[in-house]
């Protein structure tokens, strides 16, 4: 059994995690601990407070008691808003507090883009344009070329959490770009686990979503690879080819 821990801000799309646990179809347990978000707003000052060390540290003990082998701060906006270096500091502080390997959803995106072999990406974000732009800047700092960024002006995670297939598909289609080798949907408040396979079929390219990459990142920290095609190209391992001489 591999136990993975997630610090999830508030309550929006956390039911993606038990859904993904079932979709992984293996001995993986996803333990979600909720953090106090303070003000629910995709606004820089509120996001900096949401991702502050004291708010993250408050959930760490519960995760440790759950037996988690790694922990991921399951929030994109309240990690990339600190910038490339600040997000590294956030993760280092979390790792020290938890005594576990740690990461965040923002770094999960940077690593997942490389995993699917994409050099150029498009971003379709629920956030206001200024916050979406900060995510694009974070990706560029990681070495990813961002060919287009579209924000949708939604302020609260609570509103994002009400979106279903129709809204997610519309945002993905509107935010895709013909030059992009992958499309990124960066908000853990957005339900996407049930839609990834259909989105990839619709767009003809890998689609990386916040809760999906967060779980993949935790598996990576625990040195586990799981083949789960229903979770998209990111979770599809190439078979080992035996060459006979």
Image: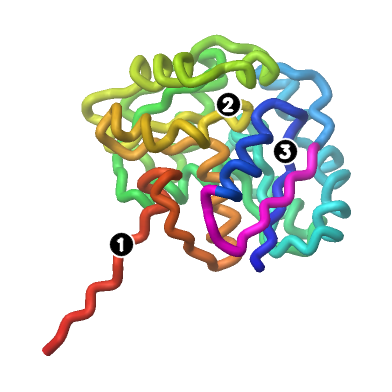
Question: Going 43% across and 35% down the picture, which residue do you hit?
Answer: 196
Residue sitting nearer the eye, 53 or 121: 121
Q: Is residue 110 in sight in this rendering?
A: yes
Residue 84 visible in the current orientation: no
> In the rendered view, does 214 fall on the left or right side of 49?
left
Label 2 and label 3: CA atoms lie apart by: 12 Å
Residue denoted by label 1: 238
Residue 67 image position (x, y, % from top left): 78, 63
**Mark 1 or mark 3: which comes first in sequence?**
3
Residue count near mark 1 (Cα–Cα under 10 Å), binned few <14, some 14–19, many ≥20: few
Question: Colour scheme of this structure image?
Answer: rainbow
Task: Give the labeled residue for mark 3.
Answer: 8
* Magenta range: 23-34
Establish if 9 lies above or below 237. above
Specify the quadrant that holds the N terminus: bottom right
Label 3, residues with CA under 10 Å away: few <14, some 14-19, many ≥20: many
Residue assigned mark 2: 190
For the residues labelled 1 and 3, the Cα–Cα distance comes to 31 Å
Furthest residue to the left? 245
157 vs 244, left or right, is right
Q: Which mark is residue 87?
A: none
Q: Earlier in the sequence, mark 2 or mark 3?
A: 3
């Amino acid at each position: 059994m591999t136990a993975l821990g997630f610090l999830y801000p508030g309550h929006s799309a956390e039911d993606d995690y038990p859904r993904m646990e079932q979709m992984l179809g293996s001995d993986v347990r996803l333990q979600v601990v909720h953090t106090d978000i303070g003000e629910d707003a995709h606004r820089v000052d509120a996001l900096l407070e949401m991702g502050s060390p004291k708010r993250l540290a408050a959930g760490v003990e519960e995760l440790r008691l759950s037996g988690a082998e790694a922990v991921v701060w399951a929030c994109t906006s309240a990690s990339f808003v600190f910038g490339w270096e600040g997000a590294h500091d956030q993760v280092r502080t979390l790792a020290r507090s938890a005594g576990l390997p740690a990461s965040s959803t923002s770094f999960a995106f940077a690593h997942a883009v490389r995993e699917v072999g994409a050099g150029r990406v498009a971003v379709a974000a629920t956030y206001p344009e200024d916050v979406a732009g900060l995510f694009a800047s974070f990706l560029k700092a990681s070495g990813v070329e961002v060919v287009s960024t579209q924000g949708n002006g939604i302020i609260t995670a609570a509103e994002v959490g009400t979106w279903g297939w129709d809204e997610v598909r519309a945002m993905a289609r509107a935010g895709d770009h013909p030059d992009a080798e992958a499309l990124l949907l960066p908000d853990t408040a957005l339900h996407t686990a049930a839609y990834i396979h259909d989105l990839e079929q619709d767009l003809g390219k890998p689609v990386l979503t916040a809760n999906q990459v967060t779980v993949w990142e935790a598996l990576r920290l625990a040195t586990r690879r799981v083949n789960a095609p229903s979770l998209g190209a990111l979770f599809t391992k190439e078979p080992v080819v035996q060459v006979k001489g």
